[in-house]
Image (spheres, rainbow, N blue to C red):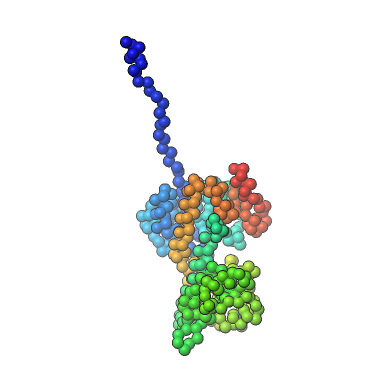
């Protein structure tokens, strides 16, 4: 009887135990930018809300978004924590568009990721050494490439620069006090203003489209014939294109009411003698980096520090404007937010920043400090440091 009971007795069996492993999402810090030449801000409240809904924790420094006219309350309602500067700098990922200084780097978490713009001319040796000492992965967003070889951050900022330059030019020309009181585009019986554009990339085409839309006569110059041909096909027959021949470009500069210089394969410069032959009230926009190098004889007016109207008050003659995109900082924030959302999605899909560095080649080529080493040749040459191939560290780490 006992044997029968023992046969029918239920014995406990091993069963798999369900385990919930919650993946820790990285925190994002948005400190205020203390650099006077950078007015743009990386994320809008709408973008912050989307990141928070995806599990990110966002810390924003109090008053950091005042430059784009968003209050702290808007970011708080979006789910961000409004904190002091130390808490914003102490996150896993810190977004600071201007190069960070040594004081801020000292407050960053060891091994954190810094997303910034490259600005090799503004990189200070002490700041780079501080990044190396704290093993911070510094990534220049403007040279991040997608899987097609495009640079989404640089391209969107270039387009904004081109559009903004013509919007500002149109406004200044129409101003009766500081400008000529004329329209950029002509009307029946009146010849329109002339716009001369050097370069044929994204910024140049954006400026040309805006100028043509307002009715201006547009002349575009570039020695890259293939890129110039592509621009001509994109813009249509209303844009007059030419290679940069000295006599032709000199004649265009003399008659131009607006001049926009964008990046070209060979840096374009106008000497003081040529500047003296240009119109007295000509408006010049230098969209190259660093700004102002195309017209070294003219004082550069930084639109990140003052509005175009304020900067031209009491000024007579020629003016050279730089940082045109900072004049429309809120538009830049919206555009950057869209691009940052794509980047953050890629980082999450790779299950963290460390894996993203290994799996995303476009992120690797944009990194300039990694594991205590300078891995970008431009920064290394600029600062007189030794450059190391990042792929070596990614293979061994």
Q: Is residue 355 left or right of residue 274?
A: left
Q: How many marks?
A: 0
Which residue of the protein is positioned furthest toward the top in this rendering? 1
* Residue 137 x/y as whole percent: 56, 50
Q: Is residue 364 left or right of residue 48?
A: right
Q: Is residue 266 left or right of residue 45?
A: right
Quadrant position of residue 319: bottom right
Q: Residue at x 64, y 50 (%)?
A: 389
Q: Is residue 225 above or below residue 11?
A: below
* Residue 238 x/y as whole percent: 52, 78
Can the viewer see residue 339?
yes
* Residue 30 x/y as whole percent: 46, 55
Give the camera-side residue of 287 and 134.
287
Quadrant position of residue 261: bottom right
Q: Residue at x 57, y 55 (%)?
A: 366
Q: Residue at x 42, y 48 (%)?
A: 55
Can the viewer see residue 101?
no
Q: Is residue 173 above or below residue 347?
A: below
* Residue 207 x/y as whole percent: 51, 72
Q: Residue at x 45, y 65 (%)?
A: 331
Report the quarter where the N terminus lies: top left
Give the camera-side residue of 389 and 93.
389
Q: Is residue 276 above or below residue 78?
A: below
Which residue of the protein is positioned furthest toward the bottom in this rendering? 189
Report the quarter where the C terminus lies: top right
């Amino acid at each position: 009887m006992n044997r029968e009971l023992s046969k029918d007795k239920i014995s406990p069996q091993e069963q798999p135990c369900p385990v919930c492993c919650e993946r820790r999402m990285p925190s994002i810090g948005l400190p205020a930018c203390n650099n006077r030449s950078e007015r743009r801000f990386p994320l809008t409240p709408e973008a912050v809300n989307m990141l928070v809904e995806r599990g990110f924790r966002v810390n924003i420094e109090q008053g950091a978004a005042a430059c784009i006219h968003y209050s702290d309350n808007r970011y708080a309602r979006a789910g961000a924590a409004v904190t002091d500067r130390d808490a914003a700098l102490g996150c896993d990922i810190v977004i600071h568009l201007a190069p960070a200084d040594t004081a801020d780097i000292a407050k960053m978490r060891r091994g954190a990721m810094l997303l910034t713009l490259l600005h090799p001319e503004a990189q200070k040796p002490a700041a780079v050494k501080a990044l190396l000492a704290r093993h911070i992965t510094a990534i220049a967003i403007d040279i991040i490439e997608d899987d097609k070889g495009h640079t989404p951050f640089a391209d969107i900022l270039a387009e904004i620069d081109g559009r903004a330059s013509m919007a500002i030019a149109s406004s200044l020309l129409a101003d009766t006090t500081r400008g000529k009181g004329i329209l950029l585009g002509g009307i029946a019986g009146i010849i329109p203003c002339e716009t001369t554009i050097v370069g044929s990339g994204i910024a140049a085409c954006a400026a040309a489209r805006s100028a043509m839309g307002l009715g201006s006569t547009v002349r575009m110059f570039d020695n890259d014939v293939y890129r110039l041909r592509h621009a001509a096909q994109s813009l249509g027959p209303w844009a007059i294109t030419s290679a940069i021949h000295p006599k032709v470009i000199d004649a265009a500069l003399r008659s131009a009411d607006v001049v926009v210089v964008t990046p070209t394969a060979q840096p374009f410069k106008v000497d003081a003698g040529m500047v003296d032959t240009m119109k007295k009230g000509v408006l010049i926009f230098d969209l190259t980096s660093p700004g102002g190098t195309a017209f070294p004889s003219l004082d550069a007016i930084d639109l990140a520090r003052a509005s175009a109207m304020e900067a031209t008050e009491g000024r007579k003659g020629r003016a050279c404007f730089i940082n045109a995109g900072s004049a429309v900082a809120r538009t830049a924030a919206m555009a950057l937010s869209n691009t940052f959302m794509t980047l953050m999605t890629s980082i999450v899909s790779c299950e963290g920043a460390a894996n993203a560095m290994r799996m995303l080649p476009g992120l690797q080529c944009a990194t300039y400090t990694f594991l205590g080493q300078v891995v970008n040749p431009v920064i290394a040459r600029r600062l007189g440091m030794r450059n190391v191939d990042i792929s070596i560290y990614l293979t061994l780490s």
